[in-house]
Amino acid sequence: MISAAQLVGTHDVLLITLDTLRYDVAVHALQSGITPNLARILPGGEWEERHTPGNFTYAAHQAFFAGFLPTPARPGRHPRLFAARFPGSETTTDATHIFDAPDIVTGLAQSGYHTICIGGVGFFNRLSPLGSVLPSLFAESHWSPALGVTDPASTQNQVDQALKTLDGVPEHRRVFLFMNVSALHQPNHFYLDGATEDSPQSQAAALAYVDSCLPSLLKRLRSRGPLLGIICSDHGTAYGEDGYWGHRICHPVVWTVPYAEFVLPWEQEAAP
């Protein structure tokens, strides 16, 4: 297990949520070779199967920001990377970085991090009180329709926004960069030639597009210093399995998600 307790303060922290990505779709895309950039950073070249604490975006991210990332899909008491301190916790160890704060965003800020949110789906758009709750945790947040679910170039636009934002942060200042990738969420049919409806196949095509956008972001982050990264889905979605459609329901395709945590070294030569 990675020791976040040893890395917080010296490593930038990246959390990317691939909104709505199903575990089976992620695994099939990896095995098909259409996500080569993810393959290079996934530990052992594989996604870890985990269970999400929430079956839709808002619930899952509230849990994530409280320190409850997806749980390994196997029996056991699984220690956590981060935790907000509360009495009686049974999933913290010496490797867990524990914050005296209500959420890990505030906790990282208290540890000297500049916190950045690159929004994607509607719960990050600040267009309503509800859409302002999650991004308001961060010192800096960004959203526009170009970053949202209806723009086929959303991920590249999100990466471009992240790069621009990072350019405004001094290199010595550690950052917590959170990005909610919207491209996997419906509608995603426009990533698959000829498709008119969303499906696991069109979501896989969307993931291939997302994969193509990631290298420049990872390169820029590694040029700043060493990196602790988490890439995962917040929940899956149903495309007619057992008569179910969508999410905010409890079905295996919704609660089973891909997850990866990794550490990448500082590469000064990666600087642009």
Image (tube, rainbow, N blue to C red):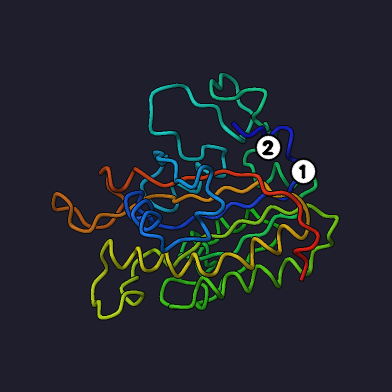
Up-down: is 141 above or below 108? below
The residue under label 2 is: 101
The residue under label 1 is: 110
How many discs appear?
2
Q: State the residue at coordinates (36%, 47%).
A: 55
x and y percentages locating residue 115 in the rendered image: 70, 55
Up-down: is 64 above or below 225? above
Q: Nearer the viewer, residue 231 or 178?
A: 231
Q: Nearer the viewer, residue 227 or 175?
A: 227
Instruction: Tell me the quarter of the picture where residue 134 sits.
Output: bottom right
Residue sticking out furthest to the left: 243
x and y percentages locating residue 75 in the rendered image: 38, 23
- The amino acid type, in three-letter code, at marker 1 is Gln
- The amino acid type, in three-letter code, at marker 2 is Ala
x and y percentages locating residue 120 in the rendered image: 50, 66
Identify the image quadrant of the C terminus.
Answer: bottom right
Q: CA distance from mark 2 to mark 1?
A: 8 Å
* Callouts 2 and 1 close, C-beta under 8 Å: yes
Q: State the residue at coordinates (25%, 65%).
A: 199
Q: Is residue 225 left or right of residue 163?
A: right
Q: Is residue 140 left or right of residue 251?
A: right
Up-down: is 255 above or below 181? above
